Image (spheres, coloured by chain):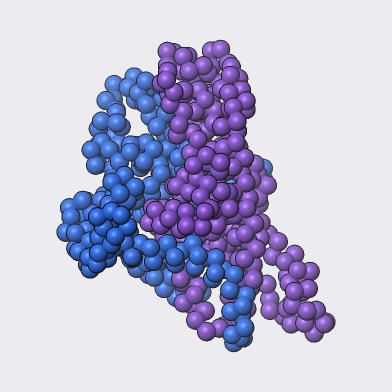
Amino acid sequence: MEKTWNNKAWFMVLPVLVLVAFSAVIPLMTVVNYSVQDTFGNNEFFWAGTDWFLDVLESDRFWDALTRNLIFSAIILSIEIPLGIIIALNMPKKGIGVPICLVLMALPLLIPWNVVGTIWQVFGRVDIGLLGRTLASLGINYNYVQNPFDAWVTLIVMDVWHWTSLVVLLCYAGLVSIPDAYYQAAKIDGASRWSVFRYIQLPKMKRVLLIAFLLRFMDSFMIYTEPFVVTGGGPGNSTTFLSIDLVKTAIGQFDLGPAAALSIIYFLIILLLSWIFYTVMTTSDAQG
Amino acid sequence: MMTNKQPLSQRLSWLVPTLYIVFLLLPIYWLVNMSFKETSEILSTFSLWPQNPTLRNYTVIFTDPSWYNGYINSITYVVLNTIISVTVALPAAYAFSRYRFLGDKHLFFWLLTNRMAPPAVFALPFFQLYSAFGLIDTHIAVAIAHCLFNVPLAVWILEGFMSGVPKEIDETAYIDGYSFPRFFVKIFVPLIASGIGVAAFFCFMFSWVELLIARTLTTTDAKPIAATMTRTVSASGLDWGVLAAAGVLTIIPGALVIYFVRNYIAKGFALGRV
């Protein structure tokens, strides 16, 4: 759509600007402030320059948490995206099944995140949980509290349970927008199921898949509540992701300097990714 | 060959979503099952359904003010946040969808980065900021703090829906002598009503499920239900039955909201850009 040049539009954006500036810029400046200063209490602050940043970047703790977080994001993306596509492709297109599927599938998305954690914490417990109990009776030694591998499996299954529906609903939205004529044409040409997917459905889902991919990446990259409730970052540090590490430093140990420096590095990583996201999305918007 | 193969794969295709839904519902079923059991039964016997169904856990929640106030608090700030977010996002989304102005693209990008900001980064500075304004432990503090990620999202969704409305409609209305506010309220808003519904749904959803910031900003008077749940540890150990019942009750508002917007969910997830 052709847009007219009008600088008065700023007045319409102003309320958003004020509100978001209040809740984003001021807190962010506080963080910047802490990241370059040191304190010995009594509200006396000393200039510390880039010391905290160097501390964070040189600490194994940061790199370990970052690596864990990247591995976690990679695993859940490689499960949730294909699984979401398969489920969306097999969903009913019309009839009573559609609202039933949509409502039931959207259910996990609207459960408060710590309740999601609680549900899985209970579900996986060997003494009272259905999953833990069933696995134990099958002779599988499963204990997410003590075994790092089990903790990871639990968190991944929980995330798949929690968020695959987002991918499903996005892909479904893309699929229902394909006109019937496309399928009829494919049928006349005798196209196989695979070519229908590859040349009709996949291109139509490209844009929503991009949104799904990036939303899932961002949200898994800043995951906090669910693993915090289920494993508390343990056993040991095996499930301490970046956000958990940050909250431990900032609120647990009250190390404001390192926490602030970590926050800024963390935020810059997200900012870089958002920029890539935005650029890729606007170019694909322009193309199609 | 094709005609033989397709009906079979179509006949079996219902299996995939069905199995997926069973997988989704199992943990929820287990929580509901637990919520109707006495804690002693949960700990002593393992059964797929309650042997002695009891409403005791729910009675505890509905008679103890510290429990049911949690629900009232959560719903209060979530509704406040939804109203604020959608109200400020409407004119902004209109500006982004209709006009080009100095710095518009940068502004839009900057808004989006806030959606991507990890709440953990903001937890501590938020506490200090709202303390300075004396807003700690009020509903409005949480409602405004959640605007951080909900306003950008609402602007983004609404902009998608508004761009789908042809510009000729605006121009015709102006020629007919409508002033901007009158046109916006009488003609434009009804046209994008489903978009507003979807935006409100998403604001509700993300404010309802968020806990880290809500918990940081509240102590007692505005404490959300999800935070109340974390203190079910009593002298006799964890009260699993009450915990499960509270969990079940947090699922209900979400389920109700989904039911009302079920026809728009899919489109809203694609942020109006399908």
Q: Residue at x 44, y 67 (%)?
A: A25
Image position, residue B257 (x, y; %): 64, 45
**How many labels were placed on the picture?**
0
Q: Residue at x 29, y 28 (%)?
A: A143
Of the chain colours in the picture, the one used for chain A is blue
Residue situated in front as seen by the camera: A97 or B141: B141
Image position, residue A208 (x, y; %): 49, 61
Q: Is residue B183 visible?
A: yes
Image position, residue A258 (x, y; %): 26, 56
Q: Residue at x 49, y 33 (%)?
A: B229
Q: Is residue A174 visible?
A: no
Q: Residue at x 51, y 50 (%)?
A: B136
Asked if residue A139 is positioned above or below residue A68 in the image, the reply reads: above
Image position, residue B22 (x, y; %): 50, 34
Residue lying furthest right in this view?
Answer: B176
Of the chain colours in the picture, the one used for chain B is purple
Tell whether A163 sits left or right of A248: right
Asked if residue A280 is positioned above or below residue A168 in the image, the reply reads: below
Residue situated in front as seen by the camera: B120 or B172: B120
Tell whether B244 sits left or right of A121: right
Residue lying furthest bottom in this view?
Answer: A5
User: In which image quadrant can residue A36 be found?
Assistant: bottom left
Tell whether A116 sits left or right of A183: left
Asked if residue B161 is positioned above or below residue A109 in the image, the reply reads: below
What is the quadrant of the N terminus of chain A in the image? bottom right
